[in-house]
Image (cartoon, helix red, strand yellow):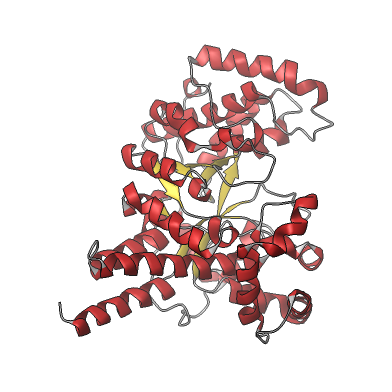
Amino acid sequence: MADDAITASLDELKRVIRTHPVIDNHGHNILRPHQLKSGNFLTITTEAHGEALEDAPKSLAHLRAVRQLKELYDLPADADWAAIVGKRAELLERDADSLIKKCLEGTQTILIDDGLDSGANIEPYSWHNKFTTSLCKRIVRIETVAASILSTLYQQEFEQAIVAAIQDDEVVGFKSVVCYRTGLDVTVGRDLDVNEHGLRSFSRHYLPDALARDFRVEAKGMNDALVISACKLIAAADEQGAAAKPLQFHTGLGDNDISLLDSSPACLQPLIKHFPTVPIVLLHSSYPYTREAGYLATVYKNVYLDIGEVFPMVSREGQELIVRQALELTPTSKILWSTDGHHFPETYWLANVQGREAIEKVLCDYVEHEDLTAAQATKAAQDVFFNNSNTLYNLRLSTTGLALHEKPAEQSQEAKSSQQDAEKGQEVSLPRSAVV
């Protein structure tokens, strides 16, 4: 291929990567106005908390974010952290919606896990619709469902709540944070054994101090039973002809509340094999276990690798290495984009900016070394950013392919309501025998 043709192909690849709309397959609610102004903004690039947070300003991730936030806020190059925080406060006071809209530019939709915080601190998931091209949807965190009903007989009510979520068109998937609670080594066994273990764990290890812990589920038998019950119900829906809603798992990168060894996605292999019809999404690049996650997504049809959260939590070089590791084995049809944006709209903006930069660097390098053609790399970018999540979550969205800064006119509420009606699926009646 002539040099001019190669350059033109690379230019088109870069244009697509920089401007293609994204389906953010895993994000969280933005804080309400008071909390948005008063929250600790230093947490945007780290999972550290408490005293460990004091060292965050010395990390490469923080220093890079500082440089990029100056661009977002239109500040001079020599502005320090105090100036950044001050300008941010000014922008939020003057017109918070404009800042949020700018941060979410280019986002088609967000699939929102709204179980991270209490409703008093965060905006409802539907509130985010005014900043995205298409309606946002819910990801139901199963442990949050359990905690809300576990002051009573938990199992039957939990299963009823999961069935209701399966039948709810606003819900496109589920999430488990069993990684944080008791680890990813979920014990798979006979229905009777799992049920008995869960009930025993409920009575012995959960009930005695449940109220003091706000009904947080931290007993392994219970956590395992919740995950397995959700998987059985999703599998039953699939058998009844409904689209199987994916189950996301927090894997890898997290704060010091997790056991790092038990956060490896390799621990999930028995569960993955046991429920081959349940789509399983390994969140957060499974960092530092990206290769293990890529292996699972390669050899199991029902497993997908999400490459979120490392933007902006990891250094630039680390992000590029993670993208490369994800692509070592994993078909590009099995890789999903997300920001893991949470609390502050700037976390969405930083993740999208940095993610596009890393993917551009890696894919252009593959084209230059003839590992991929420019057309193949372009298709891979479109699939990761949009097509794969659109298919997996049965969103049925379409994109005009417009550039990031050439967004179509904002949809009216009537238009969004019409879209919502068009996206509704068929309710499925699940047999009682499907539950644990």
Instruction: For residue 376, say whether it is visible.
Output: yes
Measured as percent of width and height from the top left, residue 283 is found at 51, 47
Farthest residue toward the left? 1
Q: Judge whether 343 appears above or below 158 on screen.
A: below
Frontmost residue, 61 versus 147: 61
Instruction: For residue 417, say whether it is visible.
Output: no
Frontmost residue, 288 versus 24: 288
Image quarter of residue 31: bottom right
Q: Judge whether 314 appears above or below 5 on screen.
A: above
Identified at 73% across, 34% down, the residue is 216
Measured as percent of width and height from the top left, residue 241 is found at 36, 37
Q: Judge whether 271 appears above or below 88 on screen.
A: above
Measured as percent of width and height from the top left, residue 127 is found at 65, 63
**In this rendering, position of residue 146 left or right of residue 189:** right
Identified at 41% across, 62% down, the residue is 385
Frontmost residue, 143 versus 412: 143
Identified at 63% across, 57% down, the residue is 125
